[in-house]
Amino acid sequence: MNEKGTAVRMTNVSKNYLMGKVAVEALKAITLEIPRKRFNVIIGPSGSGKTTLLNLIGCIDFPSSGRIEICGQDVAGLSDNETSDFRARNIGFIFQNFNLIPVLSAYENVEYPLLLTQTSARERREKVQQMIDAVGLFDHRHHRPNELSGGQRQRVAIARALVKGPELVLADEPTANLDSKTGRSIIDLMHEMQSKNNTTFIFSSHDKQIMDHAEEVFVIQDGQLVDNGREGRS
């Protein structure tokens, strides 16, 4: 198991992709520790490897070499089914394009992760209503995504990510498609929810507002970690 205060530990992690016959090294011997129950942000220019790093932490992709521990679990030793189950129980995701299911209402989108973990109907109802209310969308719970504004859709995505009580929430450029005022309200909401639920948030972002809220900042450039967890400014 990892130390009590560590949500993610990477040791000499590299990730290579094959583009035609050419091997591209997206991440180069990354070693880092991301603390639990904090507002962490990974920053760097486009193409630096931020999204690749987030995908490895989210068990969506796997390293070419090195070791990754998520919530104390060495994920390299898990089968495909075990990886899917681990991800479903421990990790929530927030995307810049929201990734809501268009034919489902806001309520049903938030409920969906609980269906994957076979939560009882009564518990699902209690958790979804509580989370929908927490993000200020109770009156819009029956609306489908195309009936909601961008900010409202991102609030649904936040509720969906948090409803199962995950150890980690990963957010890839969560304010990129929002205007600055809406983005600021979403950042404030995520910060409030992180504090209230003691969840570990890990962002990739260019947004200065997110960086200003960060407790830990990891800087990545050309696939390499150039600043390992300096304190944020809030």
Image: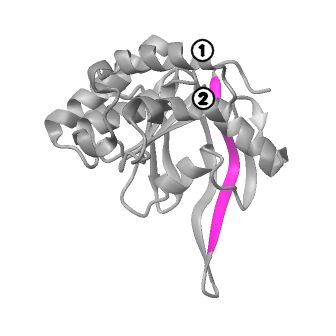
Bin the neighbour count of mark 1 within 10 Å (Cα to Cα): few under 14, some 14-19, many 20 and up: few
Give SS at disc 2: helix
Q: Is residue 127 above or below residue 66?
A: above
Whether residue 12 is visible, yes or no, is yes
Q: Earlier in the sequence, mark 2 or mark 1?
A: 2
* Horizontal arrangement in the rendering, residue 206 relative to residue 16 (left or right): left
**Picture coordinates of residue 75, whole percent (x, y):** 76, 43
**Picture coordinates of residue 144, whole percent (x, y):** 33, 40
- Residue stretch rendered in magenta on the structure: 6-17
**Picture coordinates of residue 85, whole percent (x, y):** 73, 38
* Horizontal arrangement in the rendering, residue 209 relative to residue 107 (left or right): left
Q: Are marks 2 and 1 in contact (CB under 8 Å)?
A: yes
Q: Give residue 210's quadrant in the image.
A: top left
**Picture coordinates of residue 134, whole percent (x, y):** 36, 16
Kind of residue at badge 1: Glu
Report how many numbered discs are placed on residues in the image. Answer: 2
Whether residue 234 is visible, yes or no, is no
Q: Give residue 113's quadrant in the image.
A: top right
Residue that label 1 marks: 123
Q: Is residue 143 magenta?
A: no
In this view, the residue in front, 175 or 163, is 163
- Quadrant for the N terminus, please: top right
Pick out the residue farthest to the bottom: 21
Q: Which residue: 49% across, 14% down?
A: 197
Q: Which residue: 37% across, 61% down?
A: 46
Bin the neighbour count of mark 2 within 10 Å (Cα to Cα): few under 14, some 14-19, many 20 and up: many
Q: Determine which of the numbered discs, if any, sits on residue 114 in the image.
A: 2
- Quadrant for the C terminus, please: top left
Kind of residue at badge 2: Leu
In this view, the residue in front, 199 or 136, is 136
Name the magenta segment's main secondary structure: strand
* Horizontal arrangement in the rendering, residue 190 relative to residue 38 (left or right): left
